[in-house]
Every structure is written in C-alpha cells, then in structure tokens.
Image (spheres, helix red, strand yellow):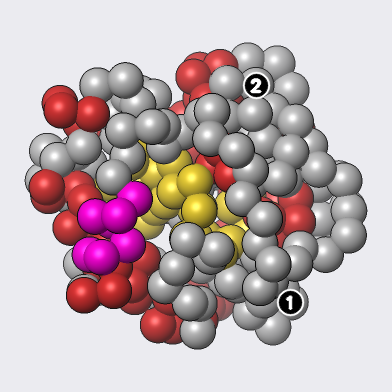
Amino acid sequence: MAPVRRHTTSSPPTGPHLRVPSRRTLLRGGAGLALAAGASAAAPLAAGQAADQNSRAKAPGDVDYPGAEWIPADPSNFTASNRPATYPVDFVVIHVTQTTFQDAIDIFQNPDKNVSSHYVIRSSDGHIAQMVRETDIGWHAGNWNYNTRSIGIEHEGWIDEPDRWFTDEMYAASAALTANICDDYGIPKNRDHIIGHNEVPGADHTDPGPHWDWDRYIELVRSA
C-alpha cells in the first residue's frame, strides 16, 4: 500500500475518517458497505430524493461529460446534493474496480450495496459510463469528508494484472475525463488533487495499486 499523501494545499474539513475493507470485499458485498463507501447518516438530502433532484437538474440521458453514457446508480447508493454550492469539488479519486465493467455497474445499481462512483471506464475501449451526477455525492472514498469534495472514477480491472487491464485506451479516456473535471472546477492538475483511493486519509485500500502509471497519467491529464 502506498503511504497516505498529505494534502497541504487543500485540507479536508474536520470529521471522522472511516476505515474500509478491501476493494474486492466492498464491491462484492461485504458487511458494512455504507461505512466502507463513506456514506453519512447525516446526509444533507435523503437518498430517496436523489432521482427527483437529478431529473430537475438534467433531462434523462444527459451527462456531465460529453461522450459518456448515462447509466444511473440506484438512488439509495449516493447522496443528492448541489455541488459546488453545497460543497467545493477539489479532488479526483482514482479507483480500480477489482471486477468487470458490467459487474461494477450492476453493483452500483443494486440498492442493497450502498456504494457508487460518478464514472466507470471500460478497459477494452475506454468507454465511459456516468452513474452519479457530479453535483451529487458518490459513496466511493471510504471517508465522508472526501466523498463530499471529490469525484470518483472507477477503472475496470484488477490491480495485479496491469498488462491486461490498464490499456492505452483506458488511460487516455480517463485522463481526458479528469482534465475536463479539473477545468470545470478549477482543480489543480497535480498529485495533491488527483489521488488514488489508497491515498484517502483513513482508507486501507490499495487501488489503483503499484502498477498504475501516475507519471504517465498526470502527463496525459495536463496535455488533454
């Protein structure tokens, strides 16, 4: 596991840091998924209100990122919000699914899982599914403070099989998406603000793992 980075340029607000099980356990349905995802019992809007708020914000099928496919997560798996008015958005959190693209989508659409991410990217061709509006709070970081202030991007694959899953197409598509998010919210394109799930304070996850090419990725983000 990589050491936790210290984010000196943008400190998180005070609050509990929740520890989480492995990413494989989280996605496969281990106990305590609400805590693992960083869901808060004191969420600003009930999850059941998410669909109504989202339908007012965007027409069905609309996406925040051009070219993405809208595949909505179940409203029980995220918190409706109105970011950045309610919370600033100043981090992008990089994940690896530890399962397939379709399985990750199925999990985020399962109301019993209590977990979601804003985007999921397919390995073979870089296809992007958006599952949570950027205005809303995905339950992905294992830390409520970071959930409120970040956008989560899941990448199909397994961290110990980089040659098979970490394709050029996925790197390029993800970097372009992250660049767009950074431009939209004024997020610096650096490693203090584009972080791995393993670098979220309090998390014990290892994704995106030691084989994720951060130097290449940040270069792609900056050149996108």
Q: Residue at x 34, y 50 (%)?
A: 214
Residue 89, position as x, y percentages in the image: 60, 72
Total count of labels? 2
Instruction: Determine the CA span between mark 1 and mark 2.
Output: 29 Å
Q: Quadrant of residue 204?
A: top right
Q: Is residue 17 magenta?
A: no
Mark 1, residues whose alpha carbon is within 10 Å: few (<14), some, or many (≥20)? few
Relative vertical location of residue 2 with respect to residue 90 in this rendering, above or below = above
Relative vertical location of residue 34 with respect to residue 127 in this rendering, above or below = above
Q: Residue at x 60, y 38 (%)?
A: 3
Residue 44 falls left or right of residue 166: right
Mark 2, residues whose alpha carbon is within 10 Å: few (<14), some, or many (≥20)? some
Which three-letter amino acid code belongs to the residue tagged 1? Answer: Thr
Q: Residue at x 29, y 29 (%)?
A: 157
Q: Magenta stretch mostly in which secondary structure?
A: helix
Label 2: which secondary element: loop
Relative vertical location of residue 140 with respect to residue 107 in this rendering, above or below = below
- For residue 86, the mark is 1
- For residue 65, the mark is none
Residue 167, position as x, y percentages in the image: 14, 40
- For residue 21, the mark is 2
Label 1: which secondary element: loop
Residue 177 falls left or right of residue 172: right
Q: Residue at x 66, y 62 (%)?
A: 7
Give the magenta-colored segment's residue range.
214-220
Q: Quadrant of residue 178?
A: bottom left
Residue 129, position as x, y percentages in the image: 31, 52
